Amino acid sequence: MSLRLIAAVVGGYLVAVAFSFACVPLLVLSHACGEKEAVMVSSMLSYLLYFAVIIVSFCRKSSVLLWRDLALIMFVCAMVTYMLGTG
Amino acid sequence: MKPDFRKSMVWLHTYSGMVLGWLLFTIFFTGTLSYFNPEITQWMQPELQQVASSQNSVNRSLAVLHEEGVNADTWRIYLPSERTQKWTIQWRHGRDSHSLDLGASLGSILMPRETAGGNFFRIFHYTLQLRGYGGRYIAGLAAMFMLVAVFSGIFTHRRFFRDFFTLRTGKLLKTLTDFHALAGIITIPFCVMICASGIMIYVIMYIPWSAEHFAGGERQLSRSLSPGLSQLDSTAPKAQPLIDFSVIQKRVNQQWPGEKQIAVITFEQPYRASGRIIVHRVNEHTLSSQSERLVFSSHSGEPLPSYLPASTAANVRRVFFGLHEAHFASTALRWLLFLLGLLSSVLIASGLVIWLSKRLEKVKKRHIGHAVVERLNIAAISGLPLATAAYFMSNRVISLGVDNRAFIEVQVFLWVWLGCLLHSVMRPARQAWIEQLLVIAALCLSLPLLDIYQDPARFTRALFAWNSIYLGFYLFMFFSAFLSFKTARWLQTKPKIATPEKATPQIATPQIARLRAGRKA
Amino acid sequence: MITVVVLQFIGICCLSFAMDKHAKVVLAKRINQGFKIGMLITGWGSLTASIVWLLLTRDNIPISLVDWLAYLSLNILLTALLHVYFVNRVAH
């Protein structure tokens, strides 16, 4: 139970942080907006993700699988940021 | 653990509501009061005069500033509005800042009593009286979990979407639950808007690392997305700031149609040739928190290049901010938002009471946890309005000459609130509710009476001038007194909610049948 | 703005009567499909008319839209309270 709670509150926050990084190069490279604007947009969108993670955290059958998925998302975001972010 | 979606939502709704319920009630209650921030402040400073219709206010302000603020770095003129009735001029030398409140007749200076006013509630609802930024983070977390509670609430009380328009008046618990569902559905758009916009105000502060990495920090990001004016050359030769505002006023009237469109006038470096005047428009025309601005030279009145347009994302954030504060709202909309805010507060309060009642129905023996929740319920739900009434009372009771008057008023609020908690611990729960509600009724009733007793001329003046803000405050006090009193009487006469010892079913008394909507003050 | 709010109120009321349970309670009779469709059309039509009127007659559209959404909550509240009132009056 407490694993879920931590997944929801802390894990969700970490996913939001990761997303706020990863979304920036995605927006910039797709010519949606400039870099600074992309930071603002990504930050705003990351809260939607936080909300979704909280809801989903309490719906998954297994908290282990939940953490696995959250870690996966953070990893993907980190990869995106690292590989595209310095462009 | 909870494979069923609906079951998970029920669990989430119960616990997110329970853990943060008291905090959310506090934030929503003080936040709702903030809709009438200037009006409350006006009532708390009865020495203010009706200055909103003063003629020639800008030039008169300039005359005073020329006298008092010689060689200042900044001048500022806050023109009065119907809501604030405050005409303030400020000037600053470096870190040294001074201000004066001007009166309606030529040359008069007002000295309204020192008070935090309605602004106390506004600041309280996001700082929670904590130092530094802690309160903002806590409020942000609360906002996020309120969104979770609203979302999960839709599924928890899904049955009520179909039974929506019913309000069973038999048992207290059923009445409260129906009312909770009704209030919940009606306030869904309002709560979602308030919580989301609240989070967006501090969108970068809560998750700053992306901004730090890509843009060099929140301040830098803000400067690039919403560019300010160019840096002022503070070594420019000296010059005299203008005396007659009419040349600028003409330009303003061309750009901004309508009367009294100026809210604030700022002079940056008025005693230099490079100095500028920034004219801020009133907020009623845009959803954005940033109202329009025009820039002029401070010694010649010539228009200067204005602010560059902010980026779309920054404007989106400003619209969120503007929606949250609702400065643009007309009186009707403001009262409607106030009503929705009160409904949301009652929603949270009823949720807390329902949680406890349901728990008490199920368990065989009460334990300390229930007692704690029960007491916190009382301290928060009736204690907070009681402390608010005490705050208003202290404004009239504390004498004018006392040092740190504003600080003392706030301390009264905080200590009375603590007192409510102690009271709730020392008395049986039902008695504590009733007694606190009766005290609220007494305070709210005696406040207008005390006010009239202190200065009858004040009241008659307000009455004959039809000062709707002053009279509206009185009416709301009477209304709150009435509501608290009725609720206290209702609690006195109705049977208890089923306790674990009793096994008998509820008996519907005539009082309950007459009641259409159980509403806690 | 009054027209907008009234049209909205009529719309919400009609939509509430299109719901079986509420129509049965307030009108004290079963509703047939035709009545239901009629109420749905009137309801949504009235809400649409309310928005259109707002767009045509108001100066500041964004602020007026915020007004509209706020009044929507109020009208839902009023309709709900009316239904509660009628439930308590109509014996069933």
Image (cartoon, coloured by chain):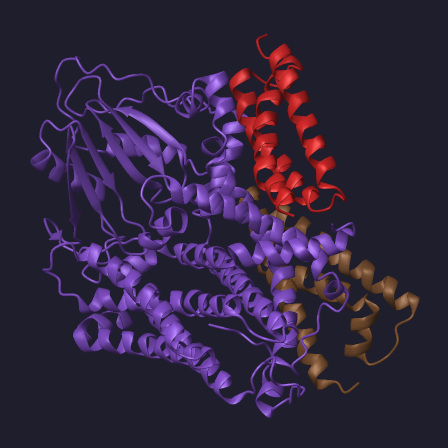
Residue at (62, 61) in percent of width and height: B184
> x and y percent of residue B439 in the render?
35, 78
* Direction from residue B235 to residue B427 in the image, left or right: right
Residue at (82, 60) in percent of width and height: C40
Query: Where B368 sits versus B61, above or below?
Result: below
Residue B177 seen from this side: yes
What shade does chain C have? brown
Query: Where B113 sits versus B246, above or below?
Result: below
Total marks placed: 0
> x and y percent of residue B226 in the render?
43, 24
> x and y percent of residue B215 in the render?
47, 18
What shade does chain B have? purple
Residue lying at the far bottom of the rendered structure: B510
- The quadrant the C terminus of chain A occupies is top right
Query: Where A26 sits versus A73, above or below?
Result: above
Residue lying at the far right of the rendered structure: C33
The one nearer the camera, C44 or B21, is B21
> x and y percent of residue B247 in the render?
26, 30
Chain coloured red in the rendered structure:
A
* Direction from residue B69 to residue B193 in the image, left or right: right
Residue B287 seen from this side: no
* Direction from residue B399 to residue B212 in the image, left or right: right
Query: Where B69 sits versus B218, above or below?
Result: below
Q: Residue B281's quadrant in the figure?
A: top left
